[in-house]
Image (tube, helix red, strand yellow):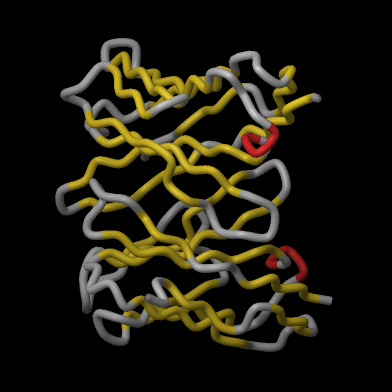
Amino acid sequence: GENVEQHPSTLSVQEGDSAVIKCTYSDSASNYFPWYKQELGKGPQLIIDIRSNVGEKKDQRIAVTLNKTAKHFSLHITETQPEDSAVYFCAASRGNRDDKIIFGKGTRLHILP
Amino acid sequence: NAGVTQTPKFQVLKTGQSMTLQCAQDMNHNSMYWYRQDPGMGLRLIYYSASEGTTDKGEVPNGYNVSRLNKREFSLRLESAAPSQTSVYFCASSDRGLAEAFFGQGTRLTVV
């Protein structure tokens, strides 16, 4: 089955700097790659996603890149702010009739003042 | 809109007791999921349901059963709770696997 590896498990960056979180997946049939942000005491919320027919997607300070050949995708957060401190999860899914969404183990991001 | 509603929010069980976690969504989504979240382990899929009347095992199904009662509701049952099932449980729903999954607020379960 699908396996999603996520690195690093913890990341600390100075406010205003950039943060990068990387994920790899094992199932070459996966074609949907969402990223979720989880704040303390809450359920995860989608922040950005990318489909296999796209190599890069950007939404304000957040961008995601996908390399299907290498089976890895990354989240980039620029100009980090205190409210970016949270746990971030990557995930992968085949879609179609097999609707499992498999998550990575998460990255705890600390934005340092 | 309520979105995804889970009950209860907190529960303490004794080893061997049974209980059912309830989940309901009001977004007319086809797919529903149960995950457990443990420190350092991320979100692990227990069971999922791609449509009403179907359920499939995820990564960690042992010790759990599920019921997709109708399109809105997807329940998770622990028949004989064990301390290893102490965790935070999240229910989620999506309009198939290629769309955003919406999560409930979670159920914090402690088995003593």
Q: Quadrant of residue A65?
A: top left
Q: Position of residue A18 (x, y in %)?
A: 59, 15
Q: Position of residue B72 (x, y in %)?
A: 30, 81
Q: Residue at x 53, y 38 (%)?
A: A89
Q: Residue at x 29, y 31 (%)?
A: A50
Q: Is residue A23 above or below residue B16?
A: above
In the image, taking residue A45 as reference, residue B71 lies left or right, namely left
Q: Quadrant of residue B92?
A: bottom left
In the image, taking residue B12 as reference, residue B76 lies left or right, namely left
Q: Residue at x 49, y 20 (%)?
A: A76
Q: Nearer the viewer, residue B90 or A65?
A: A65
Q: Residue at x 22, y 31 (%)?
A: A29
Q: Nearer the viewer, residue A16 or A58?
A: A16
In the image, taking residue B104 as reference, residue A42 lies left or right, namely right
* Count of numbered marks: 0
Q: Position of residue B100 (x, y in %)?
A: 32, 51
Q: Where's the C terminus of chain B, which quadrant?
A: bottom right
Q: Position of residue A64 (x, y in %)?
A: 38, 23
In the image, taking residue B49 as reference, residue A63 lies left or right, namely right
Q: Residue furthest right?
A: B112
Q: Is residue B33 above or below residue A81?
A: below
